[in-house]
Amino acid sequence: MKRTKVTVYIFSGLLASLASLILIGRLGAAEPTIGNLWELDAIAAAAIGGASLMGGKGSVFGTLIGVIILGVLRNGLTLLNIQAFYQLLATGLIIIIAMLIDRATRGK
């Protein structure tokens, strides 16, 4: 069990460093706050994809569907010239709605 946790943390760290290298290469600059609030998008994508925020259930396929839905929503809001604050508000509302649906379908 301990070896599995350590392996997952190592793999997660390697993927995070690879993602940061790709982002730095794309933007041509590095800032410590460049990924600020991206964790909200990750939580929203997992919640939209059907992962329970209380733990225990979820799938990679569902999360990928959630990423696509969230990306289309974010792109649509950007094309409609909606301010970034309201885009974050929409993401938060999606998380709340997904939690309510999860709670209603699974019970307390």
Image: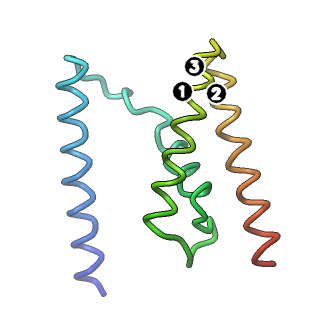
Color scheme of the displayed model: rainbow
Going 19% across and 54% down the picture, which residue do you hit? Answer: 14
Q: Label 2 is placed on what type of residue? A: Gln
Above or below, comparing residue 101 to residue 38 in the picture: below
Side (left or right) of 76 relative to 101: left
Specify which label sits upstream in the sequence, 3 or 2.
3
Provide the secondary structure element on which disc 2 rests: helix
Residue 103: percent from left, percent from top: 77, 69
Q: Label 1 is placed on what type of residue? A: Asn
Residue 78: percent from left, percent from top: 57, 19
Do residues under tags 3 and 2 come within 8 Å of each other at their CB atoms?
Answer: yes
Residue 70: percent from left, percent from top: 56, 41
Side (left or right) of 37 relative to 81: left
Q: Nearer the viewer, residue 62 or 106?
A: 62
- Give the labeled residue for mark 2: 87
Above or below, comparing residue 13 to residue 102 in the picture: above
Is the C terminus in the top left, top right, bottom left or bottom right quadrant? bottom right
Is the N terminus in the top left, top right, bottom left or bottom right quadrant? bottom left
Provide the secondary structure element on which disc 3 rests: helix
Do residues under tags 3 and 1 come within 8 Å of each other at their CB atoms?
Answer: yes
Above or below, comparing residue 107 to residue 51 in the picture: below
Looking at the rendered structure, which numbered label has been put on residue 75? 1
Count of marks placed on residues: 3
Residue 43: percent from left, percent from top: 54, 52
- Give the labeled residue for mark 3: 78
Going 26% across and 47% down the picture, which residue do you hit? Answer: 16
Closer to viewer: mark 3 or mark 2 = 3
Q: Mark 1, residues whose alpha carbon is within 10 Å: few (<14), some, or many (≥20)?
A: few
